[in-house]
Image (cartoon, rainbow, N blue to C red):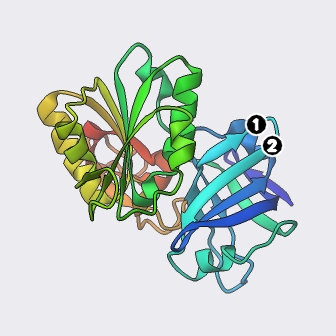
Amino acid sequence: MSNITDGKAKVKARVLSQTMLADNIYDLWLKTPFAARAGAGRFIGIYPKDASRLLPRPLSICEADKEKGALRIVYRIAGAGTAEFSGWQPGEEAAILGILGNGFPVSEGKGKRVVLMGGGIGIPPMVQLAKELKESGTETVIIAGYRDGQLFLKEDLEKYSRLLIATEDGSAGTKGNVLTVMEEKKEEADVIMACGPMPMLRAIKAYAGDKKIKAYLSLEERMACGVGACLGCVCKTTRKDGHSHVNNTRICTEGPVFEAGEVDI
């Protein structure tokens, strides 16, 4: 299966492994040539095998192993499609669409103090981002925000960066959120790159604006179909859309990563 249109390709991938990392959170490795083009903040669409579900589910790339030709997708069960994915076994084939989206501008971190912030299921993209920044010679600090003591991907993040943790219930790290850690630990940044739930991103945008820090936000939580068809992820922007000539944008096609000042969230 290979159908290439507009730079995207729908291909078959093979499941290499799958494990459960925390409650309803799964770690899926796929064998696919897309690994060669993967970048931090980008995503793929995975098609359910159930024919009643026509659109792919957009899932962000956690990590790429380009030597092995494999992509790692860490996802949360959020509906029938992802529930189906969680039952897939090694050796099974799946249809995927990729590579999609515009990712984090890794070059913007060169020579600067970069803080990465991930919250909840927005933590997985921080693995590939920290990896790429380290490979480019940029030192980073990661602040990861969890609900509780289920610290999925902790060891993976620590391979590439100094890691600070916040938990909502105080069971690990600092009690609070990623900005609580930023202020209590007196961390400083020239650039913030973040992914997580919308309330967290709004708070980071306001914090970065007050502190005059450049911030890049992944709005992937808002995506539905991942291919621009459903218009469920449209948000207001400072730029005019080339087709509609109004100040809005589709997160899945123009994003999901935006400079914080470009979007009204």
Q: Residue at x 67, y 52 (%)?
A: 72
Viewer can see residue 102 = no
Mark 2 and mark 1 residues within 8 Å of each other at the beta carbon: yes
> Is residue 263 toward the left or the right of residue 142 in the image?
left
The residue positioned farthest toward the front in the image shown: 171
Instruction: Say the numbered circle drawn on residue 144.
Output: none
Q: Amino acid at mark 1?
A: Lys
Q: Which is more toward the observer, 134 or 200?
A: 134
Q: Residue at x 16, y 35 (%)?
A: 209
**SS for tag 2?**
loop
> Is residue 1 toward the left or the right of residue 61 in the image?
right
Residue of label 2: 69
Residue 83 placement (x, y as % from top left):
61, 79
Q: Residues within 10 Å of mark 2 (few under 14, many from 20)?
A: some
**Image quadrant containing the N terminus:** bottom right
Residue of label 1: 66
